[in-house]
């Protein structure tokens, strides 16, 4: 089926907002970088202002969305009319015409929650940096890197051109490397190197996959490519295999996850928050948008393998967490388990599963972001992240312990909080898929849910209950204003998404049906 | 419309009050009063709401329902629903009454606890979650209440910071129920994936294949076993006694353990279609009834006796469900809620007065604590099934239902009905035995407060740092009134079986007392008589001595904790160790060695470039030769 695409040549308010979402943080990064070195604190405040403007822009999108999203689509050919991918707002400019490279941005229900999440977490991290600069370098530079990261991540979520997607996907790599290597813990260099080399290896595969698609299909336009009009089954399988490995490294999927615990353990608090909160989502988002969208037959071919690996990730992640003795490392491994649920949702290739994956993505970003904020604070104040030396937190710092308990209980998937929906409905999606394999996967994944509870309860018992240790006894218990500012939105959103999960799923049924090539 | 709003308020008010209460500032004085006010107001408003709803429901003569779309995930529709018939509202009424009593009682019981504010808020959340389970018209809503309750029980059981076993007990409670919930979630997933909606009315009306249905119901039963403390997932309940006593009253009476039974009642149209699920339930119930009753005989801890008695009594309810009588199960649930809440609150008064949980340290309390004593008499009498107290009528209903099912004609297999009937009958005698023993050991005879036997003196229970008074006395007003109020339903609720409205609401048959009641009465008299005779024949000796070598077995709950440790916990830990080692030494080592190998390979090439001049010259010539040959071949073709 071939679709003709009429370029929307007028500059609408929506397309301006899209462009501004990328330009504002980039401009902010430039401005802050150019400030004199003595103005460190002012630099961080300016960065926060730019991050706030960007966040405001992300919130503007639904307001500037045209009421009728009729961009002039029409379809040729026979077969059931699967509705085309209709972005809410759209911006399409030629960029490098010789290579057929276009600067094509757009946002729809699939990407929008992640865009908002990115804007929010960057703002919170920048604000957090105003008061609390980790050891290693100037706070201003850290804020600049955060803004550059935001450009890359937002670009990845907004791209509707494959090559542009690849470019933004890579933009993220170096700033993150610098954040870990510059402001991290004692083993930061090794951890940062492992992160960058591992992810680069994935990028090579991603580039191969992207180039293969673009040469075979003759276009990088994701709107045209979605539904895999022009690719043969073999090509789709090859493409999906390449892309899946690349995204699996980013997500990360067992057994390609070992860069994650090292990176998280060493990264500074804001680095961990961004890494867990939005960077991992680029992998799962890519898998949904590019992997499943461009190569649906390849996805169907690889789905059982992906499902099995996802469930292994859930089990392995939880079991390893049961043995961890380091606070941040434990939370890093818990991410492996949670992203396993997201990948299981994707692997089911049902609308239910994919929606569960989207919910799981957002919930993990909120909850794990909060957990890393709190874990980082505890580690900084106690001077150690070793669980053997942390105990009895609720005796000395009841508020901190209460917040941590909330985050942990949210993370173990308590219904009524954000984490529940993604995990429960990934299981429902697998059950819906049916057959012995998927039912087994559902059962094992549900068992993983119990193991998740086991390790979080063990963590709470060690960290918050019991007698106080000297390092806990001496830690500062007050929570500063900026810390409340960074944490409160995450707490409230965890509750809100738990009660109103439909917020994340506005307008996702149609694009996901398009991605899967099914009737909505 | 109005029903929808009132229905939303029923769980909504306590949940909101609980959430707000969690962020209230801690501290004594003003903040403490605010917290107490919030807690009591939440429970009282919910009670008021329930009464209004009951009135509306009775006047309409139909179940109240309200439904709204919540979200769609793929083809699955999730709704926010309220659906409650009169039976559900009676359960809600029991929940609210017990919660209100517990809130009032806790104000005094925890009078010097610095963390009273979060405690009161968590009790509110707990109440709201249970009310959500009771009134939800949607399986997902039910699941939310179900799990929030589990989390609240975790927080409340672990509340006491000075009790070293509290954190472990809290963790065990949450984890064991959570293991059951794996099944619960999968069962719900099977049901809603097949029905395409999670709305309870649609799920109940959906036509499932018998294989799917049986699988889903057996999975649901795993969750029920966890929540309602049924064999083999009952192990958390006795340990949960580490929580403050009012919390035990809440967990044991109307919430948590009642939730599992209630969910089976709610989904009973499905259970009726699956004899296999009912037979499983029957076996589970029979084992639990006897296991709980026998374990209760040998406990020295007052609260543990009551805890094991709960296990056994919940077994009566699941047994009634198995033999096809949800009405008997609900009736026993209601009477049990009354007398068990009474017993726990009265036990709290005893512990408050003597500063210990151990029966071997009590004795002779009757003269000093007459109110508490008479409350115990009524509570234990109801527990044992002494006519005309509440427990007698409801237990009689269960036994009649089981006896009826042994004639066949019910979905449950006849052998399973025999199993339930026999174990329920036997347990009547055992229950009478341990109830009598408890009463005699605690309230009669000389005081053993400073006596030689029993465990070493310890302030084992100090969740409110009691200073034991010279002479034990009845509790102060705020603790006494909830106890006195609860004695009324514990004594008289059984007579509600004669009220047509109540009977109709529960869909219960007319009460008729035939010759069949002679057998349980005989067993009751035998049990109580034996305990009394043992106590009377050897003054100062615990009747439990008569158990001989069975005593340690009963006291440890048939060593099922050890079995659980060996079969589940240790293999899980070993697996965790194995996976961690594999992750570090296989998966990660492969990555690291790729890096190392690359560097070494690079080193080798670098080394190769540093050979001496002569060798290098040879290499250059060789290279030129190769290139030449390639070029020649290329030209040649």
Image (cartoon, rainbow, N blue to C red):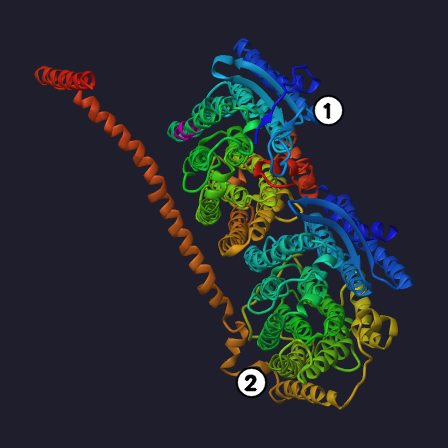
* Residue linked to disc 2: B546
Tally of marks:
2
Q: Residue at x 90, y 61 (%)?
A: B60
> x, y percentage for residue B118?
69, 48
* In the depicted structure, whether residue B162 falls above or below residue B564: above
B622 vs B526, nearest the viewer = B622
Compared across the picture, whether A135 is left or right of B218 comes to: left
* In the depicted structure, whether residue B611 falls above or below residue B268: above
Which corner quadrant holds the N terminus of chain A? Answer: top right
* In the depicted structure, whether residue B458 falls above or below residue B637: below
Q: Tell me, yes or no, whether the highlighted magenta stretch contains residue A277.
A: no
Which disc, if any, is residue A66? 1
> x, y percentage for residue B614?
8, 16
> x, y percentage for residue A457?
54, 50
The extreme right residue here reads: B59
Bounds of the magenta segment:
A201-206
Crowdedness near tag 1: few (<14), some (14–19) or many (≥20) residues, C-alpha within 10 Å: some
Give the dominant element type of the magenta stretch: helix, strand or loop: helix
Chain at numbered mark 1: A
> x, y percentage for residue A335?
51, 40
A75 vs B275, nearest the viewer = A75
């Amino acid at each position: 089926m071939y679709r003709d695409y009429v370029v929307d040549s007028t500059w609408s308010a929506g397309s301006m907002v899209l462009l501004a979402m990328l330009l504002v943080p980039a401009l902010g990064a430039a401005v802050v970088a150019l400030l004199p070195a003595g103005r460190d604190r002012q630099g961080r405040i300016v960065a926060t202002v730019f991050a706030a403007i960007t966040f405001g822009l992300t919130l503007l999108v639904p307001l500037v969305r045209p009421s009728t999203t009729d961009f002039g689509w029409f379809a040729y050919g026979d077969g059931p009319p699967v509705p085309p991918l209709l972005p809410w707002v759209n911006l399409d400019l030629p960029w490098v015409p010789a290579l057929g490279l276009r600067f094509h941005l757009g946002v729809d229900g699939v990407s929008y929650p992640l865009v908002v999440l990115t804007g929010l977490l960057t703002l919170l991290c920048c604000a957090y940096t105003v008061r609390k600069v980790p050891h290693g370098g100037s706070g201003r530079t850290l804020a600049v890197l955060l803004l550059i990261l935001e450009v890359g991540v937002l670009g990845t979520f907004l791209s509707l051109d494959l090559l542009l997607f690849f470019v933004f996907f890579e933009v993220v790599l170096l700033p993150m490397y610098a954040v870990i290597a510059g402001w991290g813990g004692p083993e930061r260099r090794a951890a940062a190197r492992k992160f960058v080399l591992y992810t680069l290896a994935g990028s090579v595969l991603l580039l191969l996959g992207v180039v293969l698609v673009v040469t075979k299909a003759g276009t990088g336009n994701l709107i045209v490519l979605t539904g895999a009009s022009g690719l043969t089954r073999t090509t789709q399988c090859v493409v999906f295999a390449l892309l899946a490995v690349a995204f699996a490294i980013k997500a990360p999927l067992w057994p390609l996850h070992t860069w994650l615990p090292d990176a998280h353990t060493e990264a500074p608090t804001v680095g961990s928050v961004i890494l867990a909160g939005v960077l991992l989502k680029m992998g799962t988002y890519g898998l949904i948008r590019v992997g499943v969208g461009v190569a649906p037959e390849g996805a169907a071919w690889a789905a059982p393998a992906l499902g099995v690996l996802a469930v292994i990730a859930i089990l392995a992640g939880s079991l390893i967490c049961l043995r961890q003795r380091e606070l941040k490392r434990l939370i890093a491994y818990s991410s492996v388990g949670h992203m396993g649920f997201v990948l299981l949702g994707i692997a089911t290739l049902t609308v239910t599963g994919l929606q569960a994956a989207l919910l799981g993505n957002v919930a993990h970003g909120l909850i794990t972001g909060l957990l890393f904020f709190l874990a980082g604070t505890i580690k900084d104040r106690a001077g150690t992240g070793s669980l053997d030396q942390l105990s009895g937190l609720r005796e000395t710092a009841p508020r901190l312990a209460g917040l941590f308990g909330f985050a942990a209980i949210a993370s173990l998937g308590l219904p009524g909080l954000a984490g529940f929906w993604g995990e429960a409905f990934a299981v429902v999606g697998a059950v819906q898929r049916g057959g012995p394999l998927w039912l087994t996967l559902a059962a094992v994944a549900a068992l993983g849910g119990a193991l998740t509870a086991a390790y979080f309860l063990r963590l709470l018992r060690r960290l918050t209950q019991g007698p106080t240790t000297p390092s806990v006894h001496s830690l500062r218990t007050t929570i500063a204003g900026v810390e409340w500012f960074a944490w409160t939105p995450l707490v409230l959103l965890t509750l809100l998404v738990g009660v109103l999960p439909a917020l994340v799923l506005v307008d996702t049924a149609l694009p996901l049906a398009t991605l899967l090539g099914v009737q909505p | 419309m109005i029903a929808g709003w009132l229905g939303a308020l029923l769980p909504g008010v306590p949940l909101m009050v609980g959430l707000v209460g969690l962020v209230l500032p801690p501290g004594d004085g003003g903040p403490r009063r605010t917290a107490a006010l919030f807690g009591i107001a939440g429970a009282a408003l919910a009670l008021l709401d329930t009464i209004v709803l009951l009135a509306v429901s009775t006047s309409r003569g139909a179940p109240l329902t309200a439904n709204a779309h919540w979200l769609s995930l793929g083809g699955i529709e999730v709704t926010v629903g309220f659906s409650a018939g009169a039976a559900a509202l009676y359960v809600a009424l029991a929940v609210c009454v017990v919660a209100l009593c517990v809130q009032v009682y806790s104000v005094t019981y925890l009078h010097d606890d610095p963390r009273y504010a979060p405690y009161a808020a968590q009790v509110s959340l707990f109440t709201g979650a249970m009310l959500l389970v009771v009134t939800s018209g949607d399986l997902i809503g039910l699941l939310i209440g179900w799990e929030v309750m589990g989390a609240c029980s975790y927080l409340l059981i672990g509340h006491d910071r000075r009790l070293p076993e509290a954190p472990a007990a809290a963790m065990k409670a949450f984890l064991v129920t959570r293991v059951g919930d794996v099944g619960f979630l999968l069962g719900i997933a099977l049901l809603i994936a097949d029905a395409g909606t999670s709305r309870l009315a649609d799920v109940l009306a959906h036509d499932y294949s018998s294989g799917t249905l049986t699988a889903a119901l057996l999975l649901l039963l795993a969750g029920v076993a966890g929540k309602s403390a049924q064999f083999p997932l009952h192990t958390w309940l006795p340990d949960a006694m580490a929580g403050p006593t009012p919390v035990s009253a809440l967990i044991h009476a109307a919430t948590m353990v009642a939730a599992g039974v209630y969910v089976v009642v709610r989904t009973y149209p499905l259970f009726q279609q699956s004899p296999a699920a009912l037979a499983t339930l029957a076996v589970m119930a029979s084992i639990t009834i006897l296991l709980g009753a026998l374990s209760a005989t040998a406990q020295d801890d007052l609260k543990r006796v009551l805890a094991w008695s709960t296990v056994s009594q919940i077994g009566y309810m699941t047994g009634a469900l198995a033999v096809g009588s949800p009405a008997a199960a609900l009736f026993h649930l209601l009477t049990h809620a009354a007398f068990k809440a009474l017993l726990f609150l009265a036990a709290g008064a005893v512990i408050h007065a003597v500063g210990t949980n151990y029966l071997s340290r009590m004795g002779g309390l009757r003269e000093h604590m007459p109110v508490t004593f008479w409350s115990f008499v009524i509570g234990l009498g109801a527990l044992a099934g002494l006519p005309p107290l509440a427990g007698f009528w409801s237990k009689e209903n269960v036994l009649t239902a089981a006896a009826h099912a042994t004639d066949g004609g019910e979905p449950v297999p006849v052998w399973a009905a025999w199993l339930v009937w026999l174990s329920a009958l036997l347990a009547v005698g055992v229950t009478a035995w341990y109830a009598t023993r408890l009463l005699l050991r605690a309230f009669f005879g000389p005081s053993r407060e400073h006596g030689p036997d029993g465990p070493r003196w310890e302030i084992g229970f100090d969740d409110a740092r009691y200073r034991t008074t010279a002479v034990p006395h009845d509790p102060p007003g705020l603790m006494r009134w909830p106890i006195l109020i609860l004695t009324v339903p514990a004594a008289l609720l059984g007579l509600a079986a004669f009220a047509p409205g109540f009977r109709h609401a529960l869909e219960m048959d007319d009460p008729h007392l035939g010759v069949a009641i002679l057998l349980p009465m005989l067993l009751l008299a035998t049990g109580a008589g034996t305990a009394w005779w043992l106590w009377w024949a050897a003054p100062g000796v615990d009747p439990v001595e008569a158990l001989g070598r069975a005593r340690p077995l009963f006291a440890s709950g048939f060593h099922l904790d050890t079995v659980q440790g060996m079969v589940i916990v240790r293999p899980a830990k070993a697996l965790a160790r194995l996976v961690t080692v594999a992750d570090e030494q296989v998966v990660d080592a492969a990555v690291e060695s790729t890096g190392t190998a690359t560097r070494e390979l690079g080193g080798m090439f670098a080394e190769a470039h540093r050979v001496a001049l002569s060798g290098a010259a040879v290499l250059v010539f060789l290279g030129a030769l190769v290139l030449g040959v390639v070029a020649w071949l290329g030209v040649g073709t």
